[in-house]
Image (cartoon, grey):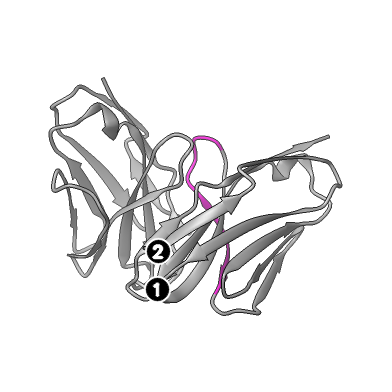
Amino acid sequence: DAGVTQSPTHLIKTRGQQVTLRCSPKSGHDTVSWYQQALGQGPQFIFQYYEEEERQRGNFPDRFSGHQFPNYSSELNVNALLLGDSALYLCASSLGNTDTQYFGPGTRLTVL
Amino acid sequence: EDQVTQSPEALRLQEGESSSLNCSYTVSGLRGLFWYRQDPGKGPEFLFTLYSAGEEKEKERLKATLTKKESFLHITAPKPEDSATYLCAVQNTGNQFYFGTGTSLTVIP
């Protein structure tokens, strides 16, 4: 049973650039949530997608956007990158938006 | 505002020395409380979900308990492989998730 997968594993960008991160949910799951985890901190909720729509959003600017595809996979896009966007980006999937979330291994983004 | 506070920030134990990690929470309406284990540079690994005060769950050397204001993760006779950061999270009735900053556990052989 495949768990949550994310790509790429690592990414290096420069300030002002744009980045796209990808996530495939655990088999049978239909809901994807994205989190940002800075070094030494807990994950912070960015947004959640269910039925291809953004259902919940945390306190993140509009530079952060996403998409969910019919096969339930998802993308996180970040525009106009800032140094402070350097973090581990985690994707979590669940069955419905009230169930336990299972996390992927994360994408480490470094902004120079 | 909904929030989660974990203590201590770091904990060093001798192998076999039992202890507890604390998760205090303030939430408008609790849908669930979650415990995860996270190894360095990896995604959190799910451990437990608790839904109501008085509920307890166990898995190997770990036991999680829940009251109306806090949760405890009890570690009995820990081994070096239990070394990790343990994260607590709450889900409110609006389906938003809030994580604590974690407790970094080191178990010394």
Q: Which residues are magenta?
A: B40-50
* Camera-nearest residue between A90 and A80: A80
Q: Secondary structure at mark 1?
A: loop
What's the residue at 31%, 60% (across, down)?
A: A32
What's the residue at 86%, 47% (across, down)?
A: B16
Horizontally, residue A25 falls left or right of residue A53, namely: right
Residue marked by disc 2? B2
Horizontally, residue B19 falls left or right of residue A63, namely: right
Is A95 magenta? The answer is: no
- Place residue B47 in its image quadrant: bottom right
Instruction: Give the chain of mark 2.
Output: B
Residue marked by disc 1? B28
In the image, residue A2 lies at what x, y percent? 45, 55
Residue A32 visible in the snapshot = yes
* Camera-nearest residue between A13 and B89: B89
Residue type at mark 2 is Asp
Q: Are marks 1 and 2 in contact (CB under 8 Å)?
A: yes
Is B43 magenta? The answer is: yes
Horizontally, residue A14 falls left or right of residue A40, namely: left
